[in-house]
Image (cartoon, rainbow, N blue to C red):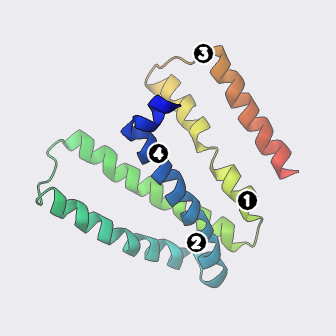
Amino acid sequence: MHNAMKARWFWYSLLCVLSWGAWALLSKLGSREIPPETMQFLFTIGCLPVCIALLIVRRFRMEKSPKGISYAVLNGVLSGIGGLTLFAAYHTGGNTSLITAATALYPMITVVLAVLVLRERIRPIQVIGLAFAAAAFVIFSI
């Protein structure tokens, strides 16, 4: 644990978890008041200051890899669709913790795609972990 706390990835991951935890709570609170479409639009507006700061830090230099740019844009489209559907789920008045836990299972899809598309290998213990995650979701939803 001591080595992990020295690694930059650990602190980035911790900031990510804290940000996304607060994001989910604010998403639910906002979705109570306004429709999902408006939430998605305003979410995008909220990303603009981060985008501008990144441009300034990079001195307005843009990437040149068409393949990388294509992946990034597709990532944005899928993120937008995912966000919109999450806001819609919150807007239904459903259980926030259940909706958040259900949508947080997206890494299971990532693992399956990594095996199928990237030909990555997973160990049996990791398959057991995926099974436990799926079982936890079922139990949590009861």
Tag 3: amino acid: Arg
Marks 4/3 in contact by CB < 8 Å: the verdict is no
Task: Locate residue 72 relative to residue 84 in the image: left or right.
Answer: left
According to the picture, the residue beneath numbered tag 2 turns out to be 26
* Residue 13: image location, x then y, percent: 47, 45
Q: 61 or 115: nearer the eye? A: 61
Which circle's residue, 1 or 4, is located before the other in the chain?
A: 4
Label 2: how many Cα within 10 Å (few below 14, some 14–19, many 20+) = few
According to the picture, the residue beneath numbered tag 4 turns out to be 13
* Residue 17: image location, x then y, percent: 53, 52
Which circle's residue, 4 or 3, is located before the other in the chain?
A: 4
Q: Residue at x 25, y 47 (%)?
A: 69
Tag 2: amino acid: Leu
Q: Residue at x 68, y 30 (%)?
A: 130
Badge number at residue 97: 1
According to the picture, the residue beneath numbered tag 3 turns out to be 123
Marks 2/4 in contact by CB < 8 Å: the verdict is no
